[in-house]
Image (spheres, rainbow, N blue to C red):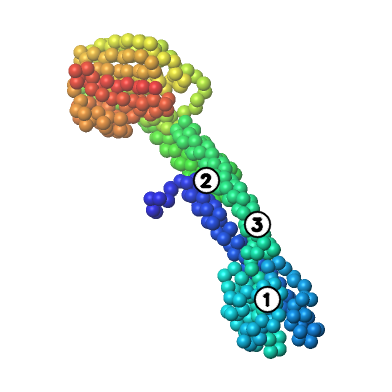
Amino acid sequence: MRRWWPRSLFGQLALLNVAIALAAAVTLPVAVGALLHRVARHYQHEVLHQQAQRVADRLSADHGDAARAMASVDLLAGGLSLAIVDAGRHVAGARRPARAEVLAAVPLVRRAALVRRGRIAVLSRPAGARWIVVSQDSTAPEVVTDDIVTTFLKRFVLLLLPFVMLGPLVAAWLTRGIRARMRRAAQTAAAIGPRALDGRLPLGTLPAEIEPLVVATNAALDRLEEAFAAQAAFAADVAHELRTPLATIRLRAGAVTDATARAALVQQVDRAARVIAQLLSLADLERPVQDDGAVVDLGAIAENVVAERAPAVLAAGRTIELYVDGAAVIPGEPAAIVLALENLIDNAVRHTSAGARIMVGAGPGARLCVCDDGAPIPPERLVRMRERFWKGEARSGGSGLGLSIVARIAAAHGGVLTLEAGEGGRGLRAAMVF
């Protein structure tokens, strides 16, 4: 498409209507003017023919006396000049001064001949051995035909202008209404997401040409919602089915007499149980998050989670600290925020060595942060740490789901999970910014 042609529907319609209006403004007066001039000339020709017929009738009634016929004939219109001439173009009789230049140029043939000489229309008609010549000057004051045409054209143009302008204005008004309806449909589509999978584009409000696209889009959203629910249900079903066998295996592991083998087996079973718990959490998060009006006090959440997790963290040989700096209260699900913060703390414990320091912060504003002073993490690994099931070599041992769950919870609350190197380039600083 050429660059001068706008991409927007409104621009295309506006440009098209302006072009049509300009074309109408130019062609309509010209076409109407040509038609009116044609009608005026037809009227003038009829007058000339009727005048010549009257002269012929009077000439016959006066037995060929041209002077008497001319004196007694009535003039049908203004600006007329009558003459009777012979083959040598000598004037036998005239009414009003004969136009010598016209008489010299008019054809004298054995049939009626109509010609124009500039502003003068001339009709010659045979009458025996002579010819009746009728001419009319269109610019004579008595001739009103051209004046009527000129006056009409001026008024016609003045009458045409409002309609020429009205077309683009009406088209712009209609297009503006269509744009407003399409904008509302776009806003509805933009609101469809994990928190509102049941949203659909409105039917019956857009033009009929766009309605099939709306129907097809809604059908695609229905299929997407069904697939979304099926995927979450499948993950939840698999996790539930695995819980019972793992519980049985852990119970039987207690009967193993070799303490080393028993500890290794229990460790692996606990790790599998943790993965299953994370899968269940992820399946719950894949369903639309319902906004029931609950609020979350981020400072209180941080205090409670640190209090609950502190004994296990200390038992693992790490230290944990808490600071609250003007933490905000946000709308959301407290249980989901607790799960996210627990995952961040467990991630810090799992991927740091004994003696590491873990700091949990709430605020300033709508922010929760967990930092550790573990081993440095290469920048290229920081980029991939939020991917599901990805495990870096330096921070291995997990399932690769913890940070993806945290990122999903943050996104469900309109926030984002940021990952960056800790103070001095050591460890990880993970922050949920809402």
Mark number for residue 134?
A: 1
**Relative to 424, is 67 above or below?**
below
Disc 3 residue type (three-letter) = Phe
Mark 1: few, some, or many residues within 10 Å (few <14, many ≥20)?
Answer: many
- Residue linked to disc 3: 152
Nearer to us in this view, 405 or 325: 325
Q: In the image, what residue type sits under mark 1? A: Val
Q: Residue at x 61, y 48 (%)?
A: 162
Q: Position of residue 97 (x, y in %)?
A: 67, 73
Q: Describe the element under mark 1 as helix, strand or loop.
A: strand
Q: CA distance from mark 2 to mark 3?
A: 51 Å
Q: Residue at x 35, y 22 (%)?
A: 432
Q: Amino acid at mark 2?
A: Val
Classify 10 Å Cα crowding around label 2: few (below 14), some (14-19), many (20 and above).
some
Residue 156 makes an appearance in the image: no
Q: Nearer the viewer, residue 341 or 21?
A: 21
Residue at the far right: name it: 61
Q: Residue at x 61, y 71 (%)?
A: 120
Q: How many marks?
A: 3
- The residue carrying mark 2 is 214
Q: Are marks 2 and 1 in contact (CB under 8 Å)?
A: no
**Label 3 or label 1, whichever comes before in sequence order:** 1
Classify the position of the C terminus by image quarter: top left
Disc marking residue 217: none
Query: Marks 3 and 1, how far apart in space?
Result: 28 Å
Of tags 2 and 3, the one toward the viewer is 3
Q: Is residue 293 left or right of residue 102?
A: left
